[in-house]
């Protein structure tokens, strides 16, 4: 596996030259892409050089160990460090999903359970919003349909990192993509008078936010309808036809937005969601033709699958894909989601490493 590093060193050298050229920085998007790749390669090369240097140090220490026992202990310590460096290098060499460095579009929809499901969808949105705050990300509401009791029948947000603030693989989509699927909740609903525990569910969909250059949308492929926005219970919240529904005719994808006051703003938000859905659909089509290793890199779970259970009576959260379980559900719902997310990230990485070695 490490033989590939020599080629990466040459690519790193070429990137250094391109980044020093003024014409590169005339194209902000190209400069960003090159900088991201340069940082990724720099981490790999630094780990590789450390691994090589430790090998030389171990050989020297073992050679001197016959004269001084202290060098034998040093050789053993260096060998331990080299194993750690080797594992870090192996992880860095696993091909990454290019979309991992993108912002995310996250949708939460109520499912089985009526009002209770809608309230749970609201709980999930708050959990992701508070997790985003801890990561230093910004959450922007794109569209929402509220329920009578204050939950959400459907809500869509954009999760954005501060420019240049995310480490490789720690941008919003790189971490949140593992949240896609069916989330099940077990608790006593506010509408339950007998105190019985009910089970309901909400669905989460996570897509990389597509820039206009990622997806070309032909206006001739769109049917745009306008209608009057409505709130909980059908009450009118807008006296003009400002809500927008966009149908992408080639794929049949339908997106509607009614959260903004102006028709133009709702159209722009709907186009953002449409581009994200088209990019996600293109990725899934590519994954279907790719190897198991490539598929596992982008998707570890079918979105229709139940991925997690939130058990309120036991204050327990269980991830059914990774086996992760903890009894701090209240803290997780308050944004302490990192251990749960990382259990999925690590499981995915282990699967891809095994596939790469095979």
Image (cartoon, rainbow, N blue to C red):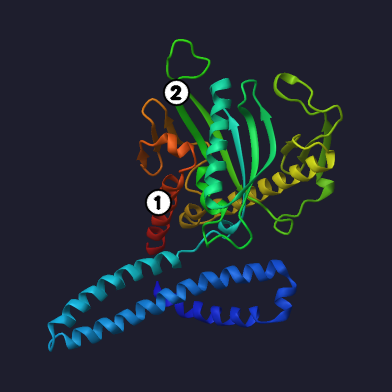
Badge 2 element:
strand
Q: Which mark is residue 187?
A: 2
Left or right: 342 in relation to 77: right
Q: Is residue 228 above or below residue 191?
A: below
| Rendered residue at 41%/76% (across/down) | 48
What percent of the width, then of the height, locates residue 246? 78, 39
Residue 341 visible within the image? yes
Instruction: Work out whether residue 315 or residue 291 is closer to the camera in this orientation and state it.
Output: 315
| Rendered residue at 43%/57% (across/down) | 352
Number of the front mark, 1 or 2:
2
Q: State which tag comes first along the sequence, 1 or 2.
A: 2
What percent of the width, then of the height, locates residue 87? 35, 66
Badge 1 element:
helix
The Cα atoms of the two marked residues, 1 and 2, are separated by 28 Å
What percent of the width, then of the height, locates residue 196? 42, 15
User: In this figure, which residue is indicated by the disc labeled 1?
Assistant: 347
Left or right: 130 in relation to 88: right
């Amino acid at each position: 596996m490490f033989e590939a590093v020599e080629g990466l060193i040459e690519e790193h050298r070429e990137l250094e030259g391109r980044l020093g050229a003024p014409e590169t920085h005339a194209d902000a998007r190209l400069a960003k892409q090159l900088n991201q790749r340069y940082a990724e390669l720099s981490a790999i090369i630094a780990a590789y050089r450390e691994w090589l240097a430790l090998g030389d140090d171990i050989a020297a220490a073992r050679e001197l160990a016959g004269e001084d026992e202290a060098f034998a202990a040093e050789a053993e310590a260096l060998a331990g460090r080299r194993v750690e460096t080797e594992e870090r290098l192996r992880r860095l060499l696993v091909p990454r999903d290019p979309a991992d460095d993108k912002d995310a579009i996250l949708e939460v929809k109520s499912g089985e359970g009526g009002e209770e499901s809608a309230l749970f969808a609201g709980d999930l949105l708050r959990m992701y919003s508070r997790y985003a705050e801890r990561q230093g990300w910004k959450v922007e509401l794109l569209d929402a349909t509220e329920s009578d009791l204050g939950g959400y029948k459907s809500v869509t947000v954009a999760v954005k990192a501060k420019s240049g603030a995310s480490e490789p693989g720690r941008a919003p989509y790189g971490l949140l993509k593992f949240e896609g699927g069916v989330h099940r909740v077990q608790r006593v609903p506010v509408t339950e008078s007998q105190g019985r525990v009910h089970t309901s569910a909400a669905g989460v969909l996570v897509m990389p936010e597509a820039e206009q250059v990622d997806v070309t949308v032909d206006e001739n492929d769109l049917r745009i309808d306008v209608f009057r926005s409505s709130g909980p219970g059908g009450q009118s919240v807008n006296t003009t036809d400002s809500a927008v529904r966009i149908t992408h005719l080639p794929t049949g994808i339908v997106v509607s937005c009614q959260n903004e006051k102006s028709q133009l703003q709702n159209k722009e938000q709907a186009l953002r969601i449409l581009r994200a859905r088209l990019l996600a659909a293109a990725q899934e089509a590519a994954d279907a033709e790719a190897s198991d290793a490539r598929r596992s890199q982008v998707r570890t779970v079918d979105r229709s699958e139940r991925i997690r259970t939130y058990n309120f009576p036991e204050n327990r959260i269980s991830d059914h894909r990774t086996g992760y379980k903890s009894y701090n559900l209240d803290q997780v719902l308050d944004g302490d989601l990192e251990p749960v997310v990382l259990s999925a990230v690590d499981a995915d990485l282990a699967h891809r490493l095994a596939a790469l070695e095979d």
